[in-house]
Image (cartoon, rainbow, N blue to C red):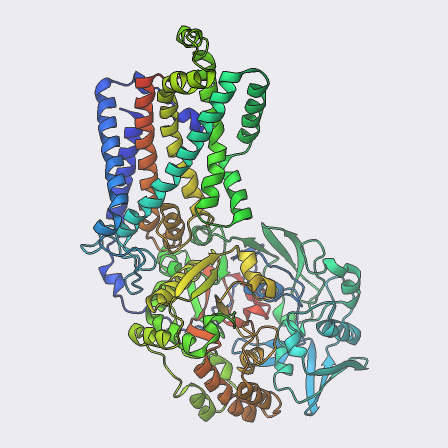
Amino acid sequence: MSIQAASRLPLKHLSLKNRRWGLIFSTSFLALILLAAVLAPLIAPYPPATVDLLRVNSGPTAQHWLGTDALGRDIFSRMIHGSRTALAGPAFVVLLSTILGLLCGLWAGWSGGRIDAVISRAFDIVLAFPALLLAILAVALFGKGLIAPVLAMSIAYTPYIGRLTRQLVATEKNRQYVSAYAVQGFSAPWIATRAVMPNVLGVVGSQTTQNFGYVLVELAALSFLGLGIQAPQADWGNMINEGQSALVSGNFLPALIPSVAVVLVVVAVNTVGGWLSDKLGDPFA
Amino acid sequence: MNKPLKLALAAGAVLALASCAVTPSEDSASAAKPSFDLTVNTAAPSGELDKLSWSLYAEPSSLDYAYAFDFSDNQVLANVCESLLRLNADMSVGPGLASKFENPNPTTWVYTIREGVTFHDGSTLSADDVVFSMNRHLDPAVGSFWYSAYANVNDIKKTGTHEVTVTTKVPDALFNESLSGAPGVIESAATLQAAGGDYGNSTGGVNCTGPFELKSWQSGEKINLTRFDGYWDKKLLAKAQEVEFVIQSDPVARVNALKSGEIDGGWMLPSNAIGELKASGAGDVFFGLNSAVNSLVVSNPEGPLGNAEVRKALLMAIDRNGLVQAAEAGFATRTNSLTTESVWGSADAATKASAFKDLIDYPYDIEAAAKIIEEQGVAGAEITITTAPMGNNFAVTAQATAAAAESIGLKAKINTVTPNAYSALFSDPAAREGTDLFYTNWYLSAGNPLEMFSILRTGDFSNYGSWSNTEFDKATNASLHTKDSVKSLSLAVESQKILNKELPWLPLYESPTNLWMNNKITGASPSVNYLYYPWAAHIGAK
């Protein structure tokens, strides 16, 4: 099963009670992570880069709730600070790809004909490249860090939003309310942006939410490979990478904790995305 | 239950279990330094082996002796190609492919080439092969990484059927000893000429005289050697019919393969895995003599670290005792010197004591270090530390150094490169561009500190920071040009003191050679000579 397919688990077939608890847990968890990211400098017990070489891989203690890493840095503090890049990176990608996808999809779906064909083929071409590959290429060309991968992934994720928007807009434009606006003399751009767009935003929004989870995993993978956020900045992908070295000494918390955090956030985001799909109508259902 | 919820709960359970499984190490944090004894020889084997599998932490960049400059290259090459002289486990030097060597005057070395030695292709070793092999180091077209050893050589000539004479421009105390390492490797001249640019790579291979011959090299996977039954030294005939070097760059995979018995042995174990390996009961970890010092190479004379005071401040900001614990799990010793006592073996007791006595200590003192940075007017200046994902010691040292630099007012950037790009730092000036500092575990091929000092002379190939100090050059050259080894080393003390004062490289710690052999094998001596001595020939069934 692909990641895309896995994200569309048929939540609607689950009991309402379970879905509600899942949703409550997910939204609460995401809110908590978001709060931690915003308040990181205020709530982290230690600065994330403070090294204590005589207290490395210490395991959970009263002073260090989640233990310390191979440099004696407090894992809990680094998790809190790492949540900033963990959320900011995907947020930027989702924002940029949604804006681009909406514009391109709207243009293609509304115009049809050659414009639609050209934009759709462009989407096909971009879709032929895995997002991670594009991000690695961007890093090779523009250097490591967050900016190049975020821009590359924004382009890579644009077709997902663009295709969906195009499909929805192409359906919407044949509806009677669109003809009614046209008869009343409203211009095509006005109808497309002011009348049609609001009707597709809900569905696009649910897809956007799910994209957030995939991007989070891919950006973490990039940092894990040493191509994204660079040490010593706290970042979950980086932390998994650095934590690897402690595995051989039997200390797996430094790698496990950020790994679990990535899994939990992705699950929570997908749960919320699934709920949104159910509420707003999943075009793939 | 909702699948995402199930996943989340499962993840939580794993986390909870993990928290229970990992012993909180309040104790380990303050644990005493682990003790380790140095082993000279392991038990002799009782029988032969069909196959010996060996873990190699990285793929050799080349098996051409002119470019074999790293641990991974030389630990393989040592079993296939031999040098004129042999480096013994105690770092003394004895006869190898040269059965005898003489020094009739301070600038002449006469080598008697051993008779009855054949290359793996069956051809006979001759003085012509020796001359041809040695002259490659002087050929600018070859660009040998070991040119420094030959820098004083005037000419290399065949002076008899089995005799080669080397004359040097000035007396060179290091030249003869260096022939026990890669600079002294002898290859078939015919093979060198036939293979051309492919010599020593995975397709061209090598054709030498060692107890094993190169059978195959599957790039990125493994290197296979087979026993050479025509080996000249019958006392050192290999006990294993085949040696398979498995390339394993991932330390976790390496350690698991060793613990499970999938791989029989390996050098250079990740220090933080030594406890786990020992506890596994699947084999033994042995410690032995080493000539390496783990240090930070200052590679940019134009940057803030071009200033000796700034280098001192940075060294003072690094908690080197902590580093020993964090980077090497305590299996190391903090040092102020770029040489180990083991390479001063030829020195008299007074010289040895003097070389390590009264060295400036540079105690861990952030406040004093920060003050120096302020006084030198470099606060806020940026340094770039280049590292590679090659193990715990690399990651910890780079990040601890970056943290130390930040703590005294410098800005530090870590540049992580691939292992191959990291290796290039040692041979390609272009690869070092933009790098101020990089970590090295620098070993000496000869049991002589002059090898370290000679590479830091003005303009030397390995003087990566283009550091220059007239007094140091003068002192080092004086030692190098003194024939009497005892007197030469007494003069070398001055070089040691200058390095300690000027810190062209920042000494961090020294650690013993380590070796893993599982319960099925025995025989290797855990000494740094494994880089030039055919160690695998000794290993057989327990």
Residue B158 sits above or below residue A238 on the image = below
Q: Is residue A236 left or right of residue B355?
A: left
The image position of residue B360, as x and y in percent, is 38, 84
What residue is shown at x 33% (from left), y 60% (from top)?
A71
Residue A166 sits above or below residue B530 on the image = above
The image position of residue A124, as x and y in percent, is 56, 26
What residue is shown at x 57% (from left), y 27% (from top)?
A122
Q: Is residue A249 left or right of residue B98?
A: left
| Residue B509: quadrant of the picture | bottom left
What residue is shown at x 57% (from left), y 29% (from top)?
A125
Q: Is residue B259 left or right of residue A64?
A: right
B368, B286: nearer the viewer: B368
The N terminus of chain B, quarter of image = top left
B426, A200: nearer the viewer: A200
Residue B13 sits above or below residue B502 on the image = above
Residue B487 visible: yes
